[in-house]
Amino acid sequence: MPNTKKHDPEFLHAALIGLQHMLGAIEGRIADLRIRVGGQPASRKAAAPAPASGAKKRTMSAAARKRIGLAQKKRWAAFNAAKAKPAPSKPPKRVMSAEGRARIVAATKKRWAAFHKAQKAATKPAAKKTAKAVVKKAVKSVAKKAPEAVAPPAVAAAPAAE
């Protein structure tokens, strides 16, 4: 059948009726053969007459589609709520004490002081060692000292409101 841009609606309607008639005849023959071969009754679809050519397609109103959609969403929400597990609670955040923070600050300041001291020593023309070696030595000497030697700075208490 050639693919043309315009089709006459009456011509297409007549073709549809002819094909439905042929389909009904073929289904009747298939049902007869099934009865002869296995004694199986004809299927309901084959026994049903062909639909009338002028049958209208059933449509659903927008309100009905909306009701059906909302009902389906409600069913899925109930299904997902039933299988959902409660979220595990997060462990509380760790909080550093003021004393611990003060120790870290003091140690960092001491390391930077040693670093700057080594930098100054390395920039003097009389020094023969490279700057890197001096810095490494200074950092190692600070690391070897006991942490108790570092005195934490006093944390000032908030003044009491009178």
Image (tube, helix red, strand yellow):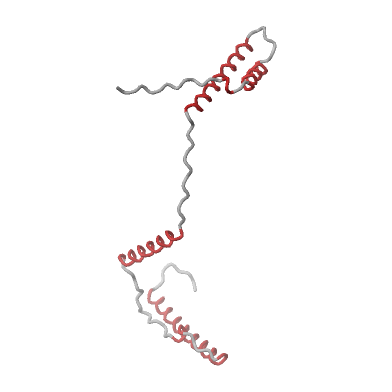
> Which residue occupies the foreground of this view, 6 or 107?
107
Image mark count: 0
Q: Going 59% across and 16% down the picture, which residue do you hit?
A: 114
Quarter of the figure with residue 49: bottom left
Instruction: Give residue 5's position: percent from left, percent from top.
Output: 43, 67
Above or below 42: residue 83: above
Instruction: Give residue 116's position: percent from left, percent from top.
Output: 58, 15
Instruction: Give residue 153's position: percent from left, percent from top.
Output: 49, 20
> Which residue occupies the foreground of this view, 23 or 133?
133
Above or below 152: residue 56: below
Quarter of the figure with residue 7: bottom left
Q: Quadrant of the C terminus?
A: top left
Instruction: Give residue 104's position: percent from left, percent from top.
Output: 53, 25
- In this rendering, would 106 be left or right of 58? right
Q: Going 34% across and 76% down the picture, which residue do you hit?
A: 56
- In this rendering, would 127 be left or right of 45? right
Residue situated furthest right in the rendering: 128
Q: Going 42% across and 59% down the picture, which residue do you hit?
A: 81
> Which residue occupies the foreground of this view, 19 or 10?
19
Above or below 105: residue 27: below
Residue situated furthest top in the rendering: 126
